[in-house]
Image: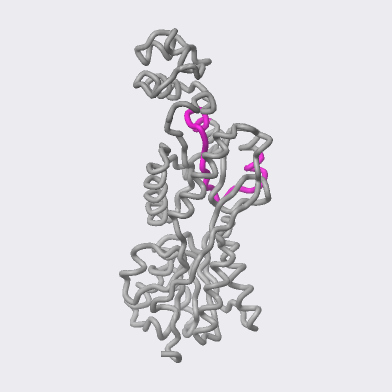
Amino acid sequence: MKVKLEDIAIRSGYSVATVSRVLSGKAKGRSQSVYDIIHTARDLGYKISLNQYSNIDIPIEMAMVTQHDAEEFYSCLYESFDRIASKMNIQISIHSAKHSSNLVEKIHLVSKFHDGIILMAPTLVSEDYEKILNKVRPFPIISIAPVDGNILPTITFDSYEGGRLAGKTLIDAGFKNFGIITGPMIKWEANLRKNGFSDALQKSGFKIDWEFQGDYSFASGETAFKDIRQNGTRGLGIFSSNDQMALGFLHTALENGMAIPGDFGMVGYDNMPYSKVFYPKLSTIGTDLDLLAEASLESLRSKIRDNNEKKTNSTTTLLPVEMVKRRTHANENSL
């Protein structure tokens, strides 16, 4: 149902004339009435173009739509986005789509009450993104997860390079046999990290000798250790596609009398806070979540202010990752 000026006037407590003046962009200054009316209009689903209010400092309202998996990672991600957004006069809300049966409709609904959307949905394929864009275009939206095809503007970490660095680090440590605990292979970043790792090994004449597909949880890391133990395999340099699985593996290995480093070497991914306090300290691929937040928020803010579909740029920006060497990547023969 179309929102009328009368509806906004009743809800906000201001006259229809005042509401009309504010929503037409004719209001001057930064009075409380302007904020009240714009906030009420947004709550009711009234579409507002921020270009009309260039003379007023109005907070941009963004939504982050995500598919949860690794809870610790998302907690850190949200904290970075919330903190950086506050500094940029951006209001951001979080919307989980983990259990959503129709992600396209969810994004369409969220778009009615926000100025732009940051999407983190790594299981989507090109057809899904096409459906989303067809539904909300020209609404500003960017992705912070790797995207299938050059469809949506994307700012994300260089997952391939992260996998390559992990492989190179384990090779340089002196390992000759290698394993990997991947994330769900339906997710693009899991594939990219595995490909980077595999290519680094092949370049040096090695291959992946053991592979286990996890789900990014601590428990799947525990299960990965049980799987490798049944094979009686030791001495592998292992790359885990995130820190939680790496620590699940190491925790269970230590409980079963294994030496780390010694029986296994391990490199995780994400450099989560707990990777620094676990003993032995986890070597991992570092990602700067503040950098991701700042870059993606600024990019989306620019798109919102441009308000021009022709200016939509579907390029992918890859943010740098780094190898954080602590203890677990070492090979007992190099100690």
On the image, the x and y values in percent for residue 142 come to: 56, 43
Magenta region = 109-130
On the image, the x and y values in percent for residue 93 come to: 41, 38
Question: The C terminus appears in which quarter of the rendering?
Answer: bottom left
Identified at 56% across, 51% down, the residue is 155
On the image, the x and y values in percent for residue 285 come to: 47, 68
On the image, the x and y values in percent for residue 169 come to: 51, 78
Residue closest to the eye, 153 or 17: 17
Identified at 47% across, 38% down, the residue is 63
On the question of residue 93 being in view, the answer is no
Q: Does the stretch in magenta take in 287?
A: no
Q: Residue furthest bottom?
A: 333
Residue closest to the eye, 207 or 212: 207
Is residue 82 positioned above or below 197 on the image? above
Identified at 53% across, 50% down, the residue is 144
Is residue 131 positioned above or below 41 on the image? below
In the displayed structure, does residue 310 sit left or right of residue 17?
right
Is residue 87 positioned above or below 5 on the image? below
Quarter where residue 192 is shown: bottom right
Residue closest to the eye, 81 or 107: 81
Identified at 68% across, 49% down, the residue is 150
